[in-house]
Image (cartoon, helix red, strand yellow):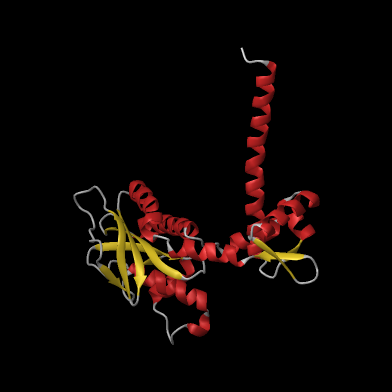
Amino acid sequence: MKSTKAKIDASVSDLKDRQRKPTAVTGLQIAEYLAMNPRGARLREIAAAVQMDPGQTHRMISAMVEDGWLMPVGDDGSYSLSARVIRLGAIYIQKLDLAEHAQPFLNELAKETGESVFLGELRDDRVVCVGRRVADRTLRVWTEMGDSWPLVGSAVGTAILAARYARLGSNAYPAKLSDEITNAIKQGYARDYGRYREGVQSVAAPIRDANGIEVGAIALSGPVTRIGDKEAVKMGALVLEAAKGISERIGYISTDKRKARRASQ
């Protein structure tokens, strides 16, 4: 049996372990709050946002300032993120591998629908296939890695263009948008209605990076004999959900989530 001293030591060790995680989490919450408030925030505002005692918050902030993660700004006792955090974010984004982050979503979507799923990355005026999960069926759609789709006419291209126009606003629209792009802006995903490749129906949704810029698209493709209008609507919603998941994985925060976070702070 363990001695009383051993039990006490174990309890103290367990307590310290439990305390370490909340401290780390609180530091990240402070950083996230200040990222949402780039002009800085005061101690009491930060304490309220992370739901922590002002005294504890002050000690946490002091440690983060000393370590170079935060810096004081202005004369009113405000703090903001330091250049160290910005550099860290820039390094992370630079080293992001879109295909690596997206592959689990491709696998899951292909498993759920039984159709082929592709990942396209925007490169100049083409969308290059950098990831895929081909359906395990005799009749299936096949696209080679490195193949590309045009921005105009393909589902992936339409999804990207629609996202671009939605981001830039109506002033950036051409004189007349195609029906495909107009529908994609409304629905959040695009369809090619079997026009890009005869006998093939594709639906695609845009992927956005941490700056909200469209960097690619995820597409699901199958024969029109299996994917009619009803199936396309259902699969379009699934593709859109997958695209949102990939976007969040590479740093994108949707407007709705930003508003929700600010409302909870």
Residue toward you, 60 or 250: 60
Residue 155 location, quadrant: bottom left
State the image coordinates of residue 54 (x, y, percent, origin top left): 80, 52
Q: How many marks?
A: 0
Q: Residue at x 36, y 55 (%)?
A: 231
State the image coordinates of residue 88 (x, y, percent, origin top left): 53, 62
Which quadrant, please, contains the C terminus?
bottom right
State the image coordinates of residue 147 (x, y, percent, origin top left): 24, 66
The image shows residue 111, relative to residue 130, as above or below, that is above
The image shows residue 22, relative to residue 154, as above or below, that is above
Residue 227 visible here: no
Residue 202 location, quadrant: bottom left
Which quadrant, please, contains the N terminus?
top right
Residue toward you, 119 or 64: 64
Q: Residue at x 52, y 81 (%)?
A: 170
Residue 149 location, quadrant: bottom left
On the picture, is 44 further left or further right than 92?
Answer: right
State the image coordinates of residue 99 (x, y, percent, origin top left): 36, 58
